[in-house]
Image: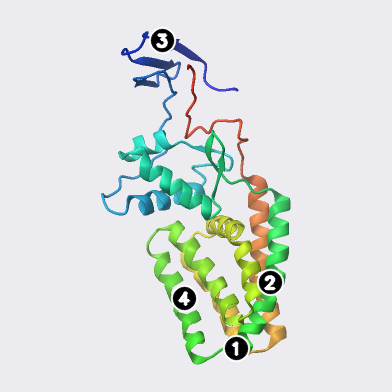
Amino acid sequence: MGGTPRTRLNCRQSTINYCTLTEAGLLELETGPFMRLMSPPVGLPAIAESDLVGQVARILTQAIMQGRLAPGAKVVEAGVARELGISRAPVREAARLLERQGLLVASPRRGFFVRKLESRDIDEIYDLRLCVERHASVLASRNLTPQTRDMLRRQIEVLHQTADLDDPARQVEEDYRFHRLICEIADNRRLLRLFDDLAAELRMVIGLIGRLYDDPHEIARTHEPVLAAIEAGHPERIVAHVDHHIGYAWRQVSKLVREIPTLGHGDVATSEADVVVAE
């Protein structure tokens, strides 16, 4: 595997620490039979004592969405824990949470990696998403009640409120919830199940959309015409607005994915490295 050339200083045996020194001057000491290359920091903020798992998950999500952890990059528990000043346990739990949400993938005996999406993945996701959300939006308009209309309106308000928090991870979730709420109101269990099957990929592409806007409030505003069309109840108008909302994102995300550098699972991210050099 390519990387920074290493000079190994074996400080010899059992109770004596092992050292690994790189030409970049990165040094880490560990007691035991393993020596590891110390990963450089990526600018993660300090966190409070409460809700460590949730905070770490949000921090890692933000690093992924902002491109500081590239697609295919390895997320190393030890490096993240060291930079945040916490133990590895909440980092591991946060990584498992993000794996369930589809932002990370786990490789047996190798750890967690940032999910990679190819151009074909984007096309397939959006093609299916258009089919699902066109139909769901038309059904939702037929089933709309004052209560469910208020729920959709409140969700757009939440999107605006989230835009003021500088929390990309939260905004991804609230954006996803708006679209899922439409599917819930459609009241078709199989359609909702199909939407949920896309959940992991949808969270990833919604996060990519966040990079397209300087003003996060604009993300919230793009949902308003969709809701207005659902409230008006004209199927052709609904489909046209869904096509515009999702189609624009499709084109922009496809372009963005082609421009984002990726790392293979055999590569080491510049932000994270956890290389066993002796056993």
The location of residue 274, given as percent across then percent down, is 47, 29
* View extreme (front): residue: 14
Left or right: residue 39 compared with residue 47: right
Q: CA distance from mark 4 to mark 3?
A: 57 Å
The location of residue 62, given as percent across then percent down, is 45, 51
Residue 75: which disc? none
Q: CA distance from mark 3 to mark 2?
A: 58 Å
The kind of residue on which mark 4 rests is Gln
Instruction: Identify the residue at image location x=68%, y=54%.
Output: 254
At mark 2, the secondary structure is: helix
At mark 4, the secondary structure is: helix
| Sequence-wise first label, 4 or 1 | 1
Instruction: Identify the residue at image location x=44%, y=20%.
Output: 24
Location of residue 251 with respect to 261 vertically, above or below: below
| Sequence-wise first label, 4 or 2 | 2
| Sequence-wise first label, 3 or 1 | 3
Residue position for label 1: 143
User: Which tag is nearer the camera, tag 4 or tag 1?
Assistant: 1
